Image (cartoon, grey):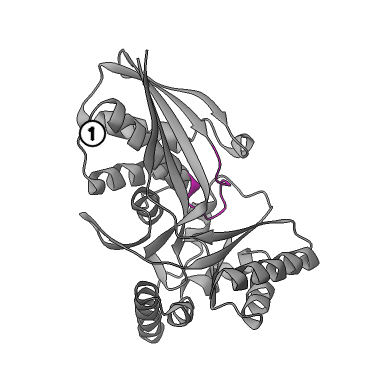
Amino acid sequence: MVRVISRAYCSSANLGSGFDVVAIALDVYYDEVMVSINRGNGNVVLEGIEGPFADLVSRDLNTAVAAVREVLKYVNRSDVDVYVRLWKGIPPSAGLGGSGASAVAAIKSLITALDLNLTNDEIIELAGRAEAVVAGEAHYDNVSASLLGGLVIIISQNPIKVVRLNTNAYFVVSTPVIRMPPNKTAIMRSILPKFVSLHDMVRNYGKLAALISGLITGNLALAGYGMEDYIIEPARSSYIPCYEVVKREAISNGALGVAISGAGPTLITLCENLESAKRISEVIKSTYTKCGYEVLIKVAQVGPGAEVIDVSYD
């Protein structure tokens, strides 16, 4: 038997103007998946879920298991049984790409255990398909960031083409402690506008250009300017606890930009430096308290890509 453990970090998608196109890995939360391989008949068994957020994870709609099944089907392997154990360190249904990270970590472990030679684009495609069990459809932004680390841009979804870019920045990641429905991502996509005015499209293009160019050149004020969105966030903001007041207080205290992380309810706040991030995190925590919400607050930097952290043999 071979056992492999891999780790994948959380991520924040969209960053305001980059809906379904931009995502960034963050170093504050991660998932780990252990897969064990035996000769068998293609069975995939979820042996257990551990970690600080284990109780919030569905065993029936589990992306780590779904990802393993996607890979076995893709490479046409039915001669092994795979046993999956998930360590859940990313808050589920928080807008931090937790389901994508689980899928990526599972695939990273499986392809190492089976010595499979899959490209990054293939891994992203398969992990995105696995996310469909909780999101209702495939998504590639979070899985790309968790796999590759850094800043990623989805330049094509069919076929999958992803560009990874280096950037350095400090963020405050604030997650109100509320119970979200298991199909939260699908719900938050269902409320989006079906038609967009040309005026708003053009305004968002400018913001997206500012976001990407600011992040890759180190002009964080420009990147923060680009985190404003005229299409997606107006539709979602009323569903995010304390969105308006947290954004206002963060900006007035020196934050460069604030956006909903993925489908929320987490907010991601871009800061000038570490000192500013620590100060703004206290402001945000106090603001949520005044709103009547407990909140998880983390100061984050850009996260690394997924990695294999242990391989053992019996």
Tell me the quarter of the picture where residue 3 sits: top left
239 left or right of 312 in image = right
Main SS category, magenta section: loop
What residue occupies the far bottom of the structure in this picture? 199
Viewer-proximal residue, 294 or 78? 294
Specify whether residue 210 is painted magenta. no
Identity, as a three-letter code, of the amino acid under mark 1: Tyr
Residue 56 placed where, x, y %?
Answer: 61, 39
Q: Is residue 265 visible?
A: no
Above or below, 173 relative to 305: below
Residue 203 placed where, x, y %?
Answer: 40, 85
Residue 136 placed where, x, y %?
Answer: 43, 47
Task: Tell me which residue sits at (45%, 60%) in the image.
Answer: 302
- In the structure shown, which secondary structural element does the residue marked by tag 1 occupy? helix
Q: What is the crowding at mark 1: few (fewer than 14 residues within 10 Å), some, or many (at least 20)?
A: few
Q: Is residue 70 visible?
A: yes
Residue pointed to by mark 1: 74
Q: How many marks?
A: 1
Viewer-proximal residue, 19 or 101? 101
Above or below, 48 relative to 251: above
Task: Tell me which residue sits at (26%, 30%) in the image.
Answer: 73
Quadrant position of the N terminus in the picture: top left
Task: Tell me which residue sits at (62%, 50%) in the image.
Answer: 180
Quadrant position of the C terminus in the picture: top left
Residue 218 placed where, x, y %?
Answer: 40, 76
Region rendered in magenta: 88-98
Specify whether residue 96 is painted magenta. yes
212 left or right of 188 in image = left
Above or below, 74 relative to 262: above
Viewer-proximal residue, 136 or 55? 55
224 left or right of 163 in image = right
Task: Tell me which residue sits at (20%, 54%) in the image.
Answer: 159
